[in-house]
Image: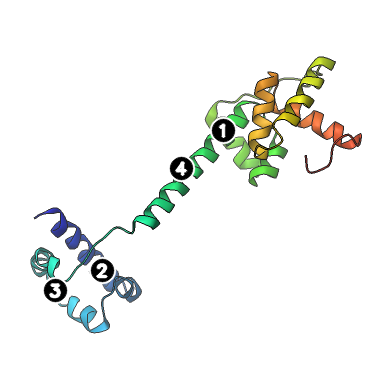
Amino acid sequence: MNAASEVSFHILRFALQRVQDGDLGAALELGFTLEEIRGMEQLTLKDLSHLSRLSGHFLRMQVDHDTYRTMLNRVREEAHSEALQDALLQAGAPRSLMADLFGWGALQYAQRRKLLGVQSPCGRPGKPTEAQEQNIWDLWQAHQHHPLAQRYLETAQAAQVSVGMVVHLLQAWEQAGLMPSDH
């Protein structure tokens, strides 16, 4: 059995299995008519195997390249987003930030931190020095054209502080009227 025949066999078997499970819609979506589905129900496994070898005559398979590229780009974007989320957690992002940026709940936050081996710091976070505050302010302004999640991470990394400290300072500046609420 060549590759095309093998794929055809699996498509036919899938369609037949779905029909036997009462899901005519799956076979109809593949392009089979009701009459063809009725005939398909009469096939034995041997008939199905023989039919799949002849499928080149009635079954046409092709790749939709535009859709494939779109799907591949979406998968890459999702992987990039997950890597960014992990990096934020590892850099000390608080739960409130992850909720605001990605819609995370407490359980997702706790489970992902546990999976990454991120430990909760003991005690209150250290207070930044004046020089650190100025550096964070300057870096935040310098990264203003970056997406927000990336901006938090890059500011914290460049200032060599936690993302939590950046969040805390931004909130303090916002309350003092030094920064708009949309950051």
Cα–Cα gap, marks 1 and 4 = 15 Å
Q: Which residue is mark 4?
A: 76
Classify mark 1: residues with Cα within 10 Å, few (<14), some (14-19) or many (20+): some
Q: State whether residue 10 is above or below residue 82.
A: below
- At numbered mark 3, what does the secondary structure look like: helix, strand or loop? loop
Cα–Cα gap, marks 1 and 3 = 51 Å
**Residue type at mark 3?**
Leu
Q: Which residue is mark 1?
A: 86
- At numbered mark 2, what does the secondary structure look like: helix, strand or loop? helix
Q: Which residue is mark 3?
A: 43
- In the rendering, which numbered label is found on residue 123? none
Mark 2 or mark 4: name the one nearer the start of the chain.
Answer: 2
Q: Nearer the viewer, mark 2 or mark 1?
A: 1
Cα–Cα gap, marks 2 and 3 = 12 Å
Q: Which residue is mark 2?
A: 15
Classify mark 2: residues with Cα within 10 Å, few (<14), some (14-19) or many (20+): many
**Residue type at mark 2?**
Ala
Mark 2 or mark 3: name the one nearer the start of the chain.
Answer: 2
Q: Nearer the viewer, mark 3 or mark 4?
A: 4
In this view, the residue in front, 178 or 92, is: 178
In this view, the residue in front, 86 or 155, is: 155
Mark 2 or mark 1: name the one nearer the start of the chain.
Answer: 2
**Residue type at mark 4?**
Arg
Mark 1 or mark 3: name the one nearer the start of the chain.
Answer: 3
In this view, the residue in front, 170 or 168, is: 170
Is 164 on the left-hand or right-hand side of 66?
A: right
Where is residue 103 shown, x and y percent of the image? Answer: 65, 47
